[in-house]
Amino acid sequence: MGVGAIAALSDRRTNAPRRLAILFLCLFVVVGLGVAYLVGDLAKLQEAISVRESRDALRGVNDPEQLDQVLKQHPSNGLLRMVALANKDAVEIDAATRRLLSEAEPRDLSAPIDLSTASRNDLDALRRDLKAAETNAAALKPRYTALIKEERDKIENDAGTLGLGNAATARFMAMIDEQHRGMMTLASDVLAARAEYYGAYEKCAAILVREFGIYKVTNGQFIFPLASTANSYNGAAAALAAGAKRIAELEDERVTLRRSQLDKWKEFVGAR
């Protein structure tokens, strides 16, 4: 065997491990790509199953009160867990709003007291409470705005832990922002309606304080010596009744908003 042949054999022996390493590397890459492909397909399959399951679960739900039972039946479904977060958000904000509104009233002013039998001291106390309630209501908006921001930060953090990906989380948070805008609009309308109600109520009480001992009450109706006074009182009483009606209408709007939220959640999972 010549020197050239010996050198070529030596080179082949030297390069053999290198070729084997390259072969294993190529095999590893091919297998890795195959696994990644299969994992991707599996993820897409799981997502499709989750969407179908959530869509079917919510299709027959027409009342927010039915949600808890449905969500408990699918505890591992990520989309339904997002719906659970949205529902919890709505419930907690609604409860907090009611607490804030209750705190704004020194006493229950939702229904007028019987002014025809009220004493002068009763009327003075009522006026103080009404003025305090009107002032407190005006100061609620910043507190409500802070409440919304706190709830949004919390739900965004909770949604991020579900592992459904950035796109789904972004779509979910866009829905939540719309939900919050609706609740803030309703809360602003309620505050405005209550302010008008308190103002009209206080005007009624103020006229009675000013005319106390002068007016008479016949069959529950106030009789004032001057027509101008009677007109002022009747105008304030009409505004008070309109304010009470508006507050009742907003309570109905609250129920309607709750149902519209459910529709948005169903739309989010494709159940509409």
Image (cartoon, rainbow, N blue to C red):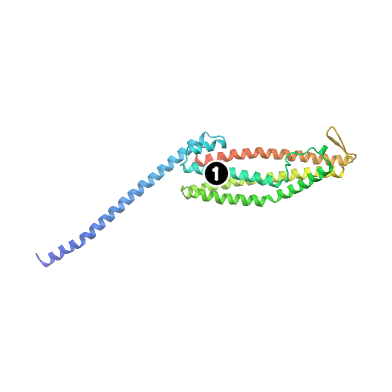
Closer to us: 69 or 80: 69
Residue at 60% across / 49% down in the picture? 148
**Residue 154 seen in render:** yes
Residue at 53% across / 42% down in the picture? 84
Q: Horizontal placement of 210 versus 191: left or right?
A: right
How far across and down, in percent of the image, does residue 1 sit? 9, 64
Q: Horizontal placement of 215 versus 99: left or right?
A: right
**Residue 186 seen in render:** no
Residue that extends furthest to the bottom in the rendered view of this protein? 3
* Relative height, residue 9 to residue 139 (above, below): below
State the residue position of label 1.
86
Q: Horizontal placement of 71 versus 116: left or right?
A: left
Question: Hey, what amino acid is under mark 1?
Answer: Ala
Q: Mark 1: which secondary structure?
A: helix
Residue that extends furthest to the left in the rendered view of this protein? 1
Total numbered labels: 1
Residue at 54% across / 41% down in the picture? 265
Closer to us: 146 or 113: 113
How far across and down, in percent of the image, does residue 185 sit? 64, 46
Quadrant in the rendering for residue 229:
top right
Residue at 71% across / 49% down in the picture? 136
Q: Horizontal placement of 76 versus 153: left or right?
A: left
How far across and down, in percent of the image, does residue 212 sit? 87, 42
How far across and down, in percent of the image, does residue 225 sit? 90, 39
Badge 1 crowding class, 10 Å Cα cut-off, few under 14, some 14 to 19, many 20 or more, is many
Closer to us: 227 or 217: 217
